[in-house]
Image: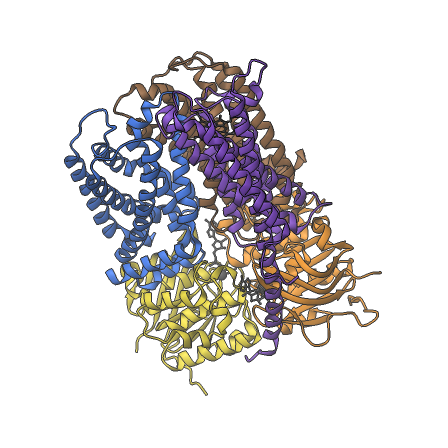
Chain colours: A brown, B blue, C yellow, D orange, E purple
Amino acid sequence: MFRDALLVAGKDLRIERRSRVGLQQIVPFAVLVIVLFAFALDPDRGVLTRAAAGLFWVAVLFSALLAVQRSQAVEGADGVRDAVRLSGLDPAGIFLGKALAVAVQLLVLEVVLGVSVVLLYDVEVVGLGVLAGTAVAATAGLAAAGSLYGALAAGLRVRETLLPLLLLPVVAPVLIAATRASESALTSTSFEVSAGDWLGLLGVFAALYVAFGLFAYGPLLED
Amino acid sequence: MFRDALLVAGKDLRIERRSRVGLQQIVPFAVLVIVLFAFALDPDRGVLTRAAAGLFWVAVLFSALLAVQRSQAVEGADGVRDAVRLSGLDPAGIFLGKALAVAVQLLVLEVVLGVSVVLLYDVEVVGLGVLAGTAVAATAGLAAAGSLYGALAAGLRVRETLLPLLLLPVVAPVLIAATRASESALTSTSFEVSAGDWLGLLGVFAALYVAFGLFAYGPLLED
Amino acid sequence: MDAVVHLRDAVCLLGRFPALAGVDLDVAPGEIVLLTGPNGAGKTTLLRALAGLVPVTAGEAVVLGHDLRRDARALRRDVGLLGHGAALYDDLTVAENVRFWARAGRAGGDVDAAMARAGLDSRVRDVIGARLSAGQRRRAALAVLFARAARLWLLDEPHAGLDAAGRDALDAEIRAAVASGTTVVVASHELDRASALATRTVTVAGGHLLGPSGRLSGEEEPLRVP
Amino acid sequence: MDAVVHLRDAVCLLGRFPALAGVDLDVAPGEIVLLTGPNGAGKTTLLRALAGLVPVTAGEAVVLGHDLRRDARALRRDVGLLGHGAALYDDLTVAENVRFWARAGRAGGDVDAAMARAGLDSRVRDVIGARLSAGQRRRAALAVLFARAARLWLLDEPHAGLDAAGRDALDAEIRAAVASGTTVVVASHELDRASALATRTVTVAGGHLLGPSGRLSGEEEPLRVP
Amino acid sequence: MKRTTTSSGLTMSLGIAALVALGATVALGLTLPKTVEQAEYSRLIAIHPGIAWTAYVACTVTALASIAWLLPRTRAAKWDLLAGASAEIGALFTALMLITGSIWGRPTWGVYWVWDARLTLSALLLALLLGYLAIRQVPADPDVRARRSAMAALLALVVVPVNHFAVEWWRTLHQGRSLAQLTPEDSLDGSFLGAMALGFLAMTLVYAWLLVHRVRVARLEEAREETALATAIEERRAEATTLAR
Ligand code: HEM
Ligand SMILES: Nc1ncnc2c1ncn2[C@@H]1O[C@H](COP(=O)(O)OP(=O)(O)OP(=O)(O)O)[C@@H](O)[C@H]1O
Ligand SMILES: Nc1ncnc2c1ncn2[C@@H]1O[C@H](COP(=O)(O)OP(=O)(O)OP(=O)(O)O)[C@@H](O)[C@H]1O
Ligand SMILES: [Mg+2]
Ligand SMILES: [Mg+2]
């Protein structure tokens, strides 16, 4: 299983290295979203600083959507889907591999995005450790759920639009938990929250989605 | 030109009628985005009501992205792009047609979305006329810019990710103008704005993008 | 009557790669020129260049009297290209697809007749593009070709995917079209069938034409249909 | 030695449409069975069903000893399918593609040898999938097939798109594979070439097999290679 | 079985029981003491929680049926059927929950809607159910569709417990879990509790009633499908004879 996971992840990352989609397009997109929010919410800037965490994670979420879409589009070429099913690759391995590749890209993105948020929304980071923990857990959750639903939507001809619809509700809890957890790490927060429980919740979700993916991906590939 | 525009728009709308992508997926997606924003910004509710207009337009923008993506994906099947170039259709006509189809779908979406915003963010509409005007002008702008850049990104294999990057900066002004204009039509607004100038600006942008599309689409197809 | 196709030392770049590296080719009206040669030789690229889809970056290139290097768009409606992939919208039925392309080309031609000539029976006409079999896609593409009034047909492996009946029908259609003044350039790997059809065979390799150059030796006899 | 393929009254639905409407077919080890028939008859669907890609919704279906209606996944690694479309990642070079699929199939086979057998010269090996010509794509797909150790080959119009040399090479490879114990089911419209290759020809039409049923008449002679 | 109606003794009795229970709930609800701050609205307690819990039940049934379909040993078309039917009704109840809740929210919180965890998650639950039903709409081979939707159903189930405990995990305006809070010195008036229980019973009966009907309708549809398939196969085979080319 892990052997297959590495094989697939390696393949996806090599494709990314060659096509530079994530680096040259998704990252700038995410930054743009942050900037746009800044505009949309401009009237009183206080909002920005207070909502920074939430907006950050919404931006990450949308970027994750793109990343997953791309990671599925790669498999979209005619015949590839059949070939994957015939390849004898362990479905769980494929799932892990694709999720892993997406996660790596997301983590890079979050770093860049985080910096720009700090700069643009003038928030101050107090708990870097918490942030890091949150990022890892949330990313795992997003990547797992994303890859799973990506595969679910991929079979259909309408994936580019079905995916967001399916994915958003599922990752919403992750989004919420991540927001609250990071808020506690930013001075800007208007009220007190304890990061602990939120991190815990994030961990639960991540574990849940990964486990579910491992079990569900095989049957999904069968369509 | 208009003959071709109608032909193309009719084709796109028929495809939409058959595949129901917009209706069954983009609209729910937009509503979901609204819901997510609401949660991301939860801490103090005042924000929501004040930022309602902005969030509405951001949601519309993201849905527009999907709509354009879909409208281009339709043309993506191998050979279709060549066929379009050989068809002898007037490029300006194609542009108008595709923009028209997108605009129609966006208008429907905005109605649904508007209603849900009013219900969910409890804002109160005072200037329905202004809103309508804003919607039409902004939609024209979005659809035009979207179709233009959609075609630009479509040629490349990585469109699903390139498009947002290209489009967001271009439509940002539209987004802002639309936000300000509609704010004046909502009681919730924290301060006074005169819709007039913003509407004017929107009109200018719409006209600009449409004109530019008419002139630039031909060369674009040639790539 | 002057040549339908006139290429001199034509070069086409795909990315940085010279897929066509100096092609000389003349085609007289009413000819059926067969392009053959190894995979990757440049046949598809040559056909796409003749349709004005791939820019010619060097040399002379005149098709149907239009200079490709200046006004490629002008000839668009006069050429009919049957490429490797059929141009079908997944969510439209065969009939809707053919009608759309016919309208787009302002072709007065009878759509139903065209589909019948392409051997698409009534059941298939109502199946959406996404659900067609390989051969049915080819047939739909043929129907579009038939429905449009083109003076130059560019056929890329037209027989591939067609069943026995379809192949014979296609050959008949090609002969009929030529008899009514169309000129045809066809790329194919099925030599026996294709060369029986063609009035002249040209070998493409390494991005140019081999052996007996593609240039016309004086006057070329247009094909007489028996 | 029991049959490699055993279908009885097998039905496959695509959407609601019965693309296969009651197929009876037996294939003995070492056979080369040619499927032919009109476009849309169900050949591709039959091959995909044998690979376990399309669920068999009624009837008996046993391939390589696995019951398709129960454990379709079990036989996956033992079948090699050459479909209408080549399974290539656009952004990976030919070599990278072939290597990936070979590793995925845990095939020890020599990748470079496989590409050589498929006639992919060193230049093409470093071209990314998106830029290949039609025939080069087919060749890459063949290389994958050669690199993987499959006991049942399912070839859908394998000759389409290949140049003359490629076709002969392919036929030689097929014969060699059969000699070393592989069984082959091939769908094709190029009757003269394909039937020369095949040990038995079966006609598919309207989703079932016509005429001399696909069932084995007693003992079938596996092909002897001269 | 050639049935022309989906009603039977079972549904009759279920229906009657449901109606009775509903009547009783209304009666009890109207006799409830009105709390000072909420006036009449406090009586919604007889309906709203019941609806909400029934929505949970529906989701759970869908999820369990989906699991039953996924397990090779118990795999059978009927489970997929049940899951789909239950999900449809579940979506209905979830919508009702949102509506009654909002109506109740106006007097209690001053607005129809606030963005606290309970409400948002409830909204998401509805979204998930709709997504699930959307997947079922996508035409595909029965098995494929069953598999896809089963997956989606399992994830929908995740939201239920989260929503249930949301009131503790997040700072919610929404009521706490009164059942959990039941202490000797009771926080919630007994009669309210009774009303909630009765309401739950009534709603569950309604649910069961609808479910049986829906499943039977689905069965009839299936039967029709089968005959349709038989003719389709005939036509398909006939294509061979009409080879006029
Ligand atoms: C749109 C708004 C609302 C929604 C979506 C909603 C949703 C729910 C849900 C999902 C439950 C089931 C809780 C569980 O056991 O997990 C529930 C129960 C309940 N709701 Fe609401 N509700 C809303 C508004 C209200 C309001 C305004 C009130 C009254 C002030 C209220 C009072 C209750 C009560 C008392 C229960 C039973 C709680 C228990 O005993 O466990 N709800 N609601
Ligand atoms: N960017 C590139 N880098 C390298 N080679 C390229 C590139 N783009 C295209 N090619 C090559 O250009 C050629 C295109 O040839 P073309 O498709 O015209 O061949 P063909 O004669 O149609 O072959 P076939 O018979 O297989 O259809 C191929 O050899 C392909 O490898
Ligand atoms: N949803 C559907 N509705 C109607 N017909 C359908 C549907 N899906 C598939 N089909 C039909 O199923 C058949 C699939 O046939 P298949 O692709 O196996 O044909 P084939 O024998 O491979 O043909 P070819 O020789 O053209 O490759 C086609 O006739 C197609 O029209
Ligand atoms: Mg070619
Ligand atoms: Mg086929």
The structure residue drawn at horizontal position 32% and vertical position 39%, both measured from the top left corner, is: B115
Foreground: E28 or B45? E28
Foreground: A153 or D51? A153
**Residue E211 appears in the rendering:** yes
Whole-percent x and y of residue B136? 24, 45
The structure residue drawn at horizontal position 52% and vertical position 61%, both measured from the top left corner, is: C131
Whole-percent x and y of residue D170? 65, 61
Total number of numbered labels?
A: 0
Examine the rendered structure and indicate whether residue A218 appears above or below residue C113: above
Foreground: E184 or A209? E184
Examine the rendered structure and indicate whether residue D148 appears above or below residue B60: below
Left or right relative to C150: residue E216: right
Examine the rendered structure and indicate whether residue C39 appears above or below residue E105: below
Whole-percent x and y of residue C109? 35, 75
**Residue D92 appears in the rendering:** no
Whole-percent x and y of residue D13? 61, 60
Left or right relative to B91: residue D5: right
Left or right relative to D36: residue C137: left
Examine the rendered structure and indicate whether residue B140 appears above or below residue C54: above
Location of residue E185 by image quarter: top right
The N terminus of chain C, quarter of image: bottom left
Q: Residue furthest bottom?
A: C226
Location of residue D15 by image quarter: bottom right
The structure residue drawn at horizontal position 34% and vertical position 40%, both measured from the top left corner, is: B113
Foreground: A38 or E177? E177
